[in-house]
Image: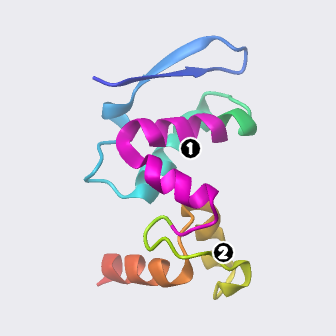
Amino acid sequence: MFLVKLWDRYDREIFINIHEKATPPRRTLKQIAKTLKTLLIRSGISKKRRIIMNKEIMRAVGLGEEVDAVEAGLCPFCKQKILKNSFRDALSEKEFQISGLCQKCQDETFNEMEG
């Protein structure tokens, strides 16, 4: 069991058993982020606090290197610098905002999932 401490909209402490919600490494980075985002939105926590807690949770489940890469403006998979105008379309840019993946890694990741 792996408990993560969060706070609700009234700054009361709440705990979430992360192993019931996300089980890395079988789930992808995107799936974990989506699960965490859903949990945090439902808890009524402010967006700023959700971002901070999401990063803390990602680090706690072993994805600290990927979080650091995104914060440094690098793709978490290939570690190449992200150029903001390098995305093919609005959907790719939205995916970048969610996962931090560059266009090349998005193409490789989602082609593997589709194929």
Q: Is residue 107 above or below residue 49?
A: below
Q: Residue at x 66, y 86 (%)?
A: 86
Q: Residue at x 38, y 31 (%)?
A: 18
Which residue lies under the disc numbered 2? 93
Q: Amino acid at mark 1?
A: Lys
Q: Amino acid at mark 2?
A: Glu
The N terminus lies in which quarter of the figure? Answer: top left
Choose top left, top right, bottom left or bottom right for residue 100. Answer: bottom right
Q: Residue at x 59, y 34 (%)?
A: 53
13 and 41: which is toward the camera: 13
Choose top left, top right, bottom left or bottom right for residue 85. Answer: bottom right
66 and 104: which is toward the camera: 66
Bounds of the magenta segment: 51-75
All told, the count of numbered labels is 2
Count residues near mark 2 (Cα–Cα under 10 Å), then give few for <14, some for 14-19, many for 20+. Answer: some
Answer whether residue 111 is magenta in the image. Answer: no
Image coords of residue 93 (percent x, y): 66, 74
Image coords of residue 91 (percent x, y): 63, 76
Residue 11 in the figure: left or right of residue 4: right
Which residue lies under the disc numbered 1? 37
Answer whether residue 55 is magenta in the image. Answer: yes
Q: Is residue 111 above or below residue 78?
A: below
